[in-house]
Every structure is written in C-alpha cells, then in structure tokens.
C-alpha cells in the first residue's frame, strides 16, 4: 500500500500538540495506576462479559421514542458540488436563521455588505452544535409541545484569511497588525452562543425577532468558574484576582442537553486566539510548569494569534488576548487568560439572567460536545466527551451525586448543574487490542505523575485545568481526532466520530493501532492526503454507564465508494452512502436514527459536505479484521482491528448535501420528529479575500442564492427540514 509520511499542516481546526509518547496497548506504565482502579476495572470487566451473554445493554430505551425504525424511508441524495442544499424527494429545506439576522432590540435588518454593526444583537457566525428546548403555548418549558421552542446554538468561529474575518468588513478588513478596533469589535461579538425562539406557522417555521427569550452570549459575557478549578492560582488574572471568573466563551463546537434541560457547549480551538510573545518562556522561566502546560495546549512562545485582537488597543477587551507574562504578577496581566477557556460551559436557555458557568470538573481540552447517558435513578450522571486534536483522547465524567428524577423538572436548573457537574470523576479511555477497553481515572486519589519532570500535579484543580497532561500520564489511547459522541437510545452504546488524522502513520508516535487502524494515501484533486484520510466511527458497550470497562468496535470506516475494499473501504460503502470526515453525530430521541454530519477536506473534489442517516446495530455485529501493510523497506506490518458489520444501503443513506465550502453540523428536532434543524457552517470558506468586491468569484453565495436575505456574501445559517406530507423525518 502506498504510504508517505504526513506533511505538517497549519490549521486552527487541526491542532496537534500531543507530544506524549503514549504507548498504544500493552506497554502502559501500570504502576502509575492505583490498585483500586485496576480492581474496579476487573470487576466491571466481568459485568461486560455478562452483557455479552445477555446480548443487549441495560441503559437504553428512551422513554420518548416511538417504535425504533428498521429501515430508512427516503431515496438517498446524490453527491453534489452544486451551491445549494439538497434533500430527498418529498422533503423541503427552509432557511431559518443566518449570520447577522437581528434578534435583539436596536439591530436593523442585515445588509450583508460588510457595513453592519451591533453583532451582539444579531446571529453570530459559523453556526455549530444546537439543542431544542420546548415551550408550551403559555411560554413555559415543555418537553412535548412541538410547534414552539427555543434553539440554543454555538457560533464557533468566522471565515478568515490573514487575521481578518473578511466577509464582515466592507473592504475585507486590514490583513496586518495592528488590527483596527472597529473590525475587532465585530469579530469579538460574532463568537459565542445564541438563544432564539422559533415557531411553526402557516408559512413554515420562523424565529421570533421580538422574543424575550432571545439572547446572545459573546466573548465578553460574564462567566463563573465552577468545579475544582474555581479559585486556582492558574486562573488569576487582572479581571479576576481570585481566579473565580472570566469573560465569555470561545470557539464553541458541539453541544449537549443535560437531563435537567440546560444547554452545555464545548470550547474547542480556543488556544489559537491567544498571542504569546517570543520572550515569554524566558520571563516565566523555561522550566516553569506554565510553559510545559502552554506547549501541551498548543501555545509556544512567539505564537501569533488567529485574529490579532490583542493588537487593537490598550483597553482590557483587547489586552486580554495577550497571554504573555508582561506584568509584575498574574494579578497585573493576562498570562493566565487562556486557562479560563477549554471547558464545557453551561447555560439555562430559559433564563438569561444568570452568568454562564464553566464546568471545570469535565476537564480542559479541545472540547467537542458532551453527550449524556440516559440518567438512571440512584446512579451517577454520566457524560462522554471528545478532545478534537490529532492524537487526543476520549473522556467520560461520572458525577458524585446520584440522579434524582425530580431534578429533571427543577426550576433553578443551574443549581442542578452545580449538583451534578461540579463534583465527580473524570476518566480517559484506553482501547485494547482484544476489543476490550478501560476507563482510567484522572484524580488525586490515583496519583498522577506527569511525564515531564517540570510539571507536578498538586490538586484536582491542576487535573481539571491541565487535563491533557494527566491523560498522557495514565497512558490513554491517542485517537484520530475525537469529535462528537452520541448515545444510542436503543441500547446505551456510545458512539464517537474520529474525523481523520493526517499524522496517523505505520510506525512512530502515532502508529496505526487496533482502534485507529487505517493508514493510506488519497488524492483530493491534485492534493495528496495521508494518514487516516477519511476518518471512522468507534463505539463502546459498557453495560452500565458508570462502568470502568467496555467492549468496542469500529461501527463505520468512512471512505470513497471506489476505494480498496480490503484496506480502505472496509464498511463496503457505495455511491448512496459514501462519505469522508464524520464530525457531528446525534441520535434522534424520537426515531433512534443516528444522524452523521461531515466536515471534510478530502473528498471535496467530488462532493460537498453531507448529512447521513443510519440505523446502527451493536458492538460485535461484525468481526475481527486484519489490515496488512507493506513498509517502504518491504517489511510487513499487520494491524488487527474489530469492525462492525458491513454497511447496507437500506440502513445507511445520504440524506442531505450542503452548499459549496460548507460543513454540515448542529442537529436538533421538534419532539414529534417532524421538524429537523441543521446548521450550514461556513459556506464559501475557500473564497479569497482579494475577491471581496467580486461576488462572482465567491465560492458560494448561499443562502442569498436560495432567496434568503440581502447581498451576495455567503452566510452560515440554520435550516429547518420538514416532510411535505407532514410525516416524521427519515421514516
Ligand atoms: Fe469544531 Fe472539531 O469541529
Ligand atoms: Ca479522493
Ligand atoms: Ca466538530
Ligand atoms: Ca469541524
């Protein structure tokens, strides 16, 4: 098989700073694990064995689910390079809420020509994960009412080139430092979250411009630090001398809905927004623990920031993006500002009066989403999370408090969040070659010795803030960019997309292993991609969500239909269901369909990004597979893996293809399953800033070309999909 060592890539969405030499399976330094953890793992392993005999897990069976589907009732959509949203026959897609749409008093209609301001009162950019929160006719929270609700969503980032978010500025903006304050002010406000009220009427769905529930959270919104990191010296800044507060949330990617009806959002590629000057290591001391941590989180001394916000003026709102130790002490500067980002944040979408809460017990990483196991009365609350960078890990949080079903209907929802999300234990996944796996505890009960002697874990706050270093130390399995996780309501199994990994190789630090077995080369037009080019989806069966062990297999190997079926297209995909770079993944609570979304840069010579629908089986429905590789010197390497059963075009189909340059992301539905909301992120992102005055050269003009809104500049947007006959989506 052809193989070249991967070329380094510089992309803010493709971070790569895991230099740990973590072994993959057997050579783990077991003495670092407490005897207790090992014993608990062994006991849970027995439970998993029992599960295998029983044939199905016990955590599943969503209360709200209609009868689970066995086939998908639509004709698949063909791959496409058109600048449109394509859905199956019998469905309609309508644009609902696009970048710049006004949602708060004082914002005028969006002109979409780069002259708009007041982005704190408008839709943010790069719509990403989202969740539905129902309202009844009286405007009270409702889990059943299907024609009125709130949608909370993430605004991850913005389409940029050479510092500037060019579609936001009339002339594209200044592409050099220092940035202009008037440009930065807009860019600071298009990041964060939205809450909007939506309703179904005779003309379809719309958002209510005048709803009192409408809300924007930006990079400047007050935020409280909760959990073990609260008050840590590592969080002390000029803004928060006692380390209990920060401002805003940043690069919010995936989401989750808690069992108590709040919204959680993952801060993903936040590190790229911070500047560190070239002398910062010397001032801190080269062996200072903070230098070790900054490098592990992707910020070397001399690192330039993505937008240069720190250069726009001396005011605090700009200065805070300079993460260098410039003052006499941490109280006088923003050397610790980055440590306030990288968390799961929680808001109450029904109550805009409370600050957002950063739930540090769930660890600090490039968070995608947090997906919750179905809560069981008297058992801990469990959430699963991925850290999306090359070679990073999959995590699980197990609450200290036991679930009380009455909390599902509490009115002080953030107080319930305090109860379940501020105390608990974080675990990181280790996938073993034999198809079993283990959750490794990250806490001071289980002494954690960092690989780098210059970094010492002294408290649970240190583990919460420097989670990646702790996971390195216990020997977690380095994965191919863990993106969203989802829990199958039918059987409680946990799915994670592993979107791709250009650094996966045959040998070396990220050598192919059972859980990340593919290494190959594929062309995208004239561009050569290496490693795990198209990504895969791994799944775990635990028996009980708080178990310490699991069985796993690979549900899906994403691939081009025409690729080698013995080495690449291992799931037997055809033209109706081939895909690349799975990213978003959500199980519908109403139908059990697993919706899979792509954010791809490998198959884009053939098709735009897409939304797939799947009815998966269960862990173990396939079998063992051995991949045989030839090294350049002629020697052979064999990798054993565990594959789910081959895909069928009956239970795995392409449902939607998006416009040019866009990723498909974000998923929620009305509780009756008859309206599905999807986000179209960054259409036209490959447009050149030099072409800003020439719309004909834009890569995309969506959604204006679909009849939505003014101007021709492409806009990220939420769409709503309904069936023409009013039926449930996908059936
Ligand atoms: Fe925001 Fe990892 O995608
Ligand atoms: Ca190709
Ligand atoms: Ca993602
Ligand atoms: Ca993405």
Image (cartoon, helix red, strand yellow):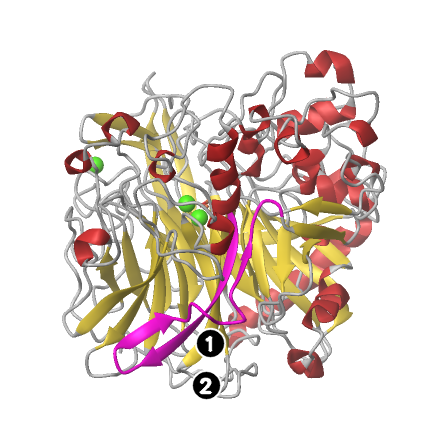
Give the vertical position of 182 relative to 569 (above or below): above
Report x, y in % for residue 587: 42, 68
Q: Is residue 434 visible to the viewer in this orientation of the structure?
A: no
Answer with the quarter of the image where residue 683 lies: top left
- Secondary structure, mark 1, is strand
Instruction: Find the magenta span and give its range.
Output: 191-220
Of residues 115 and 472, which is closer to you in this image?
A: 115
- Picture layout, residue 633 above or below residue 596: above
Q: Is mark 2 within 8 Å of ligand 3?
A: no
Left or right: where does residue 453 sit relative to residue 388?
Answer: right
Tell me residue 445's x, y (percent): 84, 49
567 displayed left or right of 390: left
Ligand 4: image quarter: top left
Point 75% across, 47% down: residue: 245
Circles 1 and 2: CB distance less than 8 Å? yes
Q: Quadrant of residue 512?
A: top left
- Residue 418 lies in the magenta stretch: no
* Residue pointed to by mark 1: 149
Graded by Cα atoms within 10 Å as few (under 14), some (14 to 19) or many (20 or more), the crowding at tag 1 reads: many
User: Would residue 534 be seen by someone viewing this image from the given angle?
Assistant: yes
Determine which residue is flagged by label 2.
145
What x and y, as percent, mark residue 556? 35, 54
Residue 195, magenta (yes or no): yes
Identity of the residue drawn at 68% across and 51% down: 222
Judge from the rendering whether residue 673 lies leftward or rightward of residue 653; answer left or right: right
Q: Position of residue 538 (x, y in %)?
A: 45, 53
Q: CA distance from mark 1 to mark 2?
A: 8 Å
Q: Secondary structure at mark 2?
A: loop
């Amino acid at each position: 098989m052809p193989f070249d060592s991967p070329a380094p890539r510089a992309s803010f969405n493709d971070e790569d700073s895991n230099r740990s030499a973590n072994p993959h399976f057997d050579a783990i330094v077991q003495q670092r694990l407490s005897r207790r953890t090992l014993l608990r793992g062994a006991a849970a392993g027995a439970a998993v064995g029992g599960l295998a005999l029983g044939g199905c897990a016990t955590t599943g069976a969503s209360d709200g689910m209609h009868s689970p589907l066995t086939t998908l009732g639509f004709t698949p959509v063909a791959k496409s390079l058109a600048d449109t949203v394509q859905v199956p026959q019998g469905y309609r897609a309508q644009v609902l809420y696009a970048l710049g749409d006004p949602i708060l008093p004082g914002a005028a209609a969006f002109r979409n020509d780069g002259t708009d301001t007041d982005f704190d009162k408008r839709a943010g950019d790069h719509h990403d994960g989202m969740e539905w929160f129902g309202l009844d006719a009286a405007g009270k929270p409702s889990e059943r009412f299907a024609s009125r609700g709130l949608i909370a969503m993430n605004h991850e980032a913005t389409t940029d080139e050479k510092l500037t978010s060019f579609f936001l500025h009339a002339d594209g903006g200044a592409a050099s430092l220092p940035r202009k304050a008037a440009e930065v002010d807009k860019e600071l406000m298009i990041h964060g979250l939205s809450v909007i009220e939506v309703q179904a009427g005779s003309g379809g769905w719309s958002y209510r411009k005048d709803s009192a529930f409408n809300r924007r959270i930006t990079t400047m919104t007050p935020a409280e630090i909760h959990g073990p990191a609260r008050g840590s010296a590592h969080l002390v800044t000029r803004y928060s001398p006692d380390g209990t507060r920060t401002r805003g949330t940043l690069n919010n990617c995936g989401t989750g809905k808690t069992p108590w009806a709040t919204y959680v959002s993952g801060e993903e590629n936040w590190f790229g927004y911070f500047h560190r000057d070239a002398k910062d290591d010397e001032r801190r001391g080269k062996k200072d623990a903070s230098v070790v941590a900054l490098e592990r989180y992707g910020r070397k001394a001399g690192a330039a920031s993505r937008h240069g916000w720190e250069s726009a003026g001396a005011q605090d709102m700009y200065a805070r993006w300079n993460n260098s130790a410039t003052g006499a002490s941490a109280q006088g500067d923003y050397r610790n500002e980055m440590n306030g980002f990288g968390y799961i944040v929680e808001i109450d979408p029904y109550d805009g009066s409370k600050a957002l809460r950063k739930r540090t017990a769930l660890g600090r990483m490039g968070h995608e989403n947090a997906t919750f196991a179905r809560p069981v009365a008297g058992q801990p609350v469990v959430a699963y999370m991925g850290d999306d960078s090359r070679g990073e890990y999959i995590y699980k949080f197990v609450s200290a408090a036991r679930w009380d079903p009455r909390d599902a209907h509490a009115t002080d929802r953030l107080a319930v969040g305090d109860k379940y999300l501020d105390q608990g234990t974080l675990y990181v996944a280790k996938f073993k070659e034999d198809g079993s796996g283990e959750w490794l505890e990250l806490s001071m009960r289980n002494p954690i010795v960092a690989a780098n002697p210059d970094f010492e874990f002294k408290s649970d706050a240190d583990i919460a803030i420097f989670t990646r270093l702790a996971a390195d130390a216990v020997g977690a399995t380095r994965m191919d960019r863990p993106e969203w996780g989802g829990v199958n309501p039918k059987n409680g199994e946990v799915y994670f997309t592993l979107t791709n990994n250009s650094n996966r190789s045959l040998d070396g630090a990220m050598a192919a292993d059972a859980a990340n077995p593919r290494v190959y080369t594929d062309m995208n037009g004239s561009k050569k991609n290496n490693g795990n080019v198209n990504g895969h989806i791994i799944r775990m069966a635990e028996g009980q969500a708080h178990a310490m062990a699991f069985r796993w297999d690979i549900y899906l190997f994403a691939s081009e239909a025409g690729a080698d079926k013995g080495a690449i297209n291992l799931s037997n995909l055809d033209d109706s269901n081939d895909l690349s770079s799975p990213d978003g993944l959500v199980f519908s609570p109403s139908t059990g369909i697993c919706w899979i979304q792509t954010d791809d840069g490998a198959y884009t010579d053939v098709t735009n990004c897409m939304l797939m629908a799947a009815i998966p089986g269960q862990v173990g429905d396939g079998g063992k597979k051995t991949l045989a590789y030839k090294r350049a010197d002629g020697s052979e390497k064999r990798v054993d893996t565990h594959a789910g059963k081959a895909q069928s075009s009956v239970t795995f189909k392409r449902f939607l293809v998006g416009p040019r340059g866009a990723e498909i992301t974000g998923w929620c539905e009305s509780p009756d399953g008859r309206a599905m909301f999807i986000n179209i992120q960054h259409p036209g992102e490959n447009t050149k800033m030099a072409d800003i005055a020439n719309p004909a050269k834009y890569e995309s003009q969506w959604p204006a070309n679909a009849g939505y809104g003014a101007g021709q500049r492409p806009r990220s947007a939420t769409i709503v999909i309904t069936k023409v006959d009013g039926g449930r989506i996908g059936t």
